[in-house]
Amino acid sequence: MVAREGRCVICRSHELLNSGRGVRFQVRRHGEVVPAFAIRFDDKVHAYLNRCAHRALELDWEAGEFFDAYGEHLICASHGARFAPASGACVGGPCHGAGLVKLTVTEESGRLCLETGDDIHLVPSDEVV
């Protein structure tokens, strides 16, 4: 992970396959270290905080596994809540309409980059506890 002018490289673009395994990373948000993840869906990359909208639990049922068996929705392994991969909106389950917190990412030169700002920063892997 490399910092570059308000952007931090999360991973190489080829690491994310459509409806495949996601890449986990951590961000510092409002002073708190929070798990996050990036996925590819319909040839576009998306990133979210790795916290179910129903309860603050991580979604993946196995490290990096966020999609349901059909590759159509992100699913919370703890509660079964389902989310639209492109928007993070709740599409079913106990989240009662609350969606995932979306992070801004871009792809450039074969890399996925997190847009950082006043309230969001990538936590370098050597700082992860």
Image (cartoon, rainbow, N blue to C red):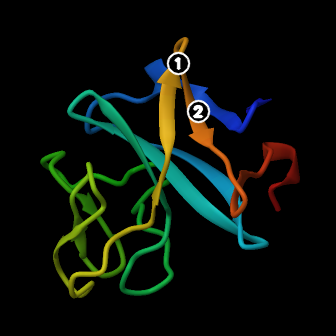
Instruction: Name the residue: 12% across, 48% down.
Output: 70
- For the N terminus, the image quarter is top right
Instruction: Name the residue: 72% across, 73% down.
Output: 30
Instruction: Choose between 98 and 73: the one closer to the eye.
Output: 98
Dot 2: element: strand
Pointer 1: what residue? 108
Image quadrant assignment for residue 11: top right
Three-letter amino acid code at the position of disc 2: Cys
Tag on residue 113?
A: 2
Q: How many labels does the image show?
A: 2
Q: Where is residue 87 in the image (x, y as percent from the top left)?
A: 27, 56
Contact between labelled residues 1 and 2, with CB atoms less than 8 Å apart: yes
User: How many C-alpha atoms fall within 10 Å of the one at disc 2: few (<14), some, or many (≥20)?
Assistant: many
Q: Position of residue 90 (x, y in %)?
A: 22, 72
Instruction: Name the residue: 41% across, 30% down.
Output: 16
Question: Which residue is situated farthest in the top direction here?
Answer: 109
Label 2, label 1: how far apart the Cα atoms are: 7 Å
User: How many C-alpha atoms fall within 10 Å of the one at disc 1: few (<14), some, or many (≥20)?
Assistant: few
Question: Which residue is situated farthest in the right direction here?
Answer: 127
Is residue 56 shown left or right of residue 128?
left
Is residue 121 shown left or right of residue 43?
right
Three-letter amino acid code at the position of disc 1: Glu
Q: Where is residue 104 in the image (x, y as percent from the top left)?
A: 49, 47
Dot 1: element: strand
